Amino acid sequence: MNRLLAFLAGLLFGFGLLLSGMANPAKVLAFLDLAGPWDPSLALVMVGAIATALPAFQLARRRDRSLLGAPMQLPARRSLDRRLVAGSLVFGVGWGLAGFCPGPALTVLLTGHGKVLVFVAFLLLGMGLFERLEASASHTSGGRR
Amino acid sequence: MTVDWSAFTPASALAGGVLIGLASGLFVLADGRVAGISGLLGSLLRPVRQWVGEKALFVLGLVLSPLVWSLWASPPAIEINTPWPLLALAGLLVGLGSRYGAGCTSGHGVCGLARLSLRSLVATVCFMATGFLTVFVVRHLLPEVIR
């Protein structure tokens, strides 16, 4: 049941990206282009998504287990560190270059647009590089930070 | 700033956002997990995979969604105008940045803000800022690169 619902949640998430226009890089870039002819649509995607998810997360915060009994695994970190800021700044540059972030890129992966394969290949390369750097950092410092 | 009203699609944007919010709510209430795509994808690249089932199935649902979608709706418009060398660079930056920043548009921008997390608010302000700035530089300071 957990797994079926995980699959359905992924499917629904993808439908949301497709319906909203968030899966279309040209529309994302039109939103990020404040100085051009600006398309504010994606601000409403954020509003709709956050407003709908808010009650679910407020309920989730008060529970140790999910409604199906799985452990509730919400992020525990509170610190505003350099990694959070630097990583997010770098992510934004990539997002602004392509108009793709990870969710939409995976959603578009099988739609036959060849260019998305290039983006996803390098996305995985970047993530793999992160894992390598983290592994070597924890070897030298003697533990994962 | 001039709003391009002809491109503005408030109804589908809001409805699509609601679906994204429902999917994130379903995932956290059923499986106890945050629907952060960079985190889910990154964890599948780790040598030690815990609870790989639910994470992998969420990602599978996402990847298959356009195929299921086109069973009863016309395929949505997808336009990728960025030249591929820039897409490659962008992919690398998105991969590295989202993992160092511990999240992307979904994990910080939707789920994190819905959790009222200060870390996610800071992350979202950061990536929105460089997203706006990058498009400004590419489109208005170096137009010949992209056009």
Image (tube, rainbow, N blue to C red):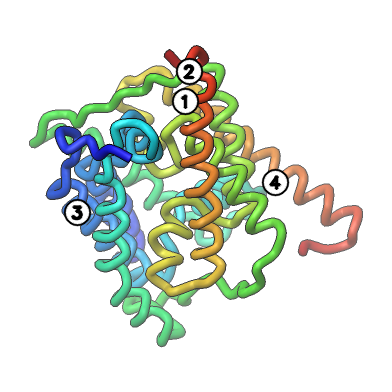
Q: Secondary structure at mark 1?
A: helix
Task: Pick the residue in front: A77 or A90.
Answer: A90
User: Is disc 3 in contact with disc 1, using a CB cutoff of under 8 Å?
Assistant: no
Question: Which three-letter amino acid code belongs to the residue tagged 3?
Answer: Leu
Q: Could you say which disc has been placed on residue A96 in the image?
A: none
Q: In the image, what residue occupies the spot 25% across and 53% down? A: A44
Which residue is under mark 2? B143
Which residue is under mark 1? B140
Q: Give how far apart the Cα atoms at labels 2 and 3 are.
A: 32 Å
Q: Using the image, determine if residue B91 lies above or below residue A89.
A: above
Report x, y in % for residue B143: 48, 18
Task: Pick the residue in front: B80 or A15.
Answer: B80
Name the subunit of mark 4: A
Which residue is under mark 3? B14
User: Is disc 2 in contact with disc 3, using a CB cutoff of under 8 Å?
Assistant: no
- Residue under disc 3 on the same chain as residue under disc 1: yes
Q: Give how far apart the Cα atoms at labels 2 and 4 are.
A: 35 Å
User: Is disc 2 in contact with disc 4, using a CB cutoff of under 8 Å?
Assistant: no
Q: In the image, what residue occupies the spot 32% across and 72% down? A: A54
User: For the residue carrying disc 1, how many other residues have a C-alpha within 10 Å: few (<14), some (14-19), or many (20+)?
Assistant: few
Kindly report which numbered mark, 4 or 1, lies closer to the viewer in this rendering.
1
Which residue is under mark 4? A131
Kindly report which numbered mark, 4 or 3, lies closer to the viewer in this rendering.
3
- Residue under disc 2 on the same chain as residue under disc 4: no
Q: Secondary structure at mark 3?
A: helix
Residue found at the far bottom of this picture: A62
Question: Which three-letter amino acid code belongs to the residue tagged 2?
Answer: Pro
Report x, y in % for residue A34: 38, 39
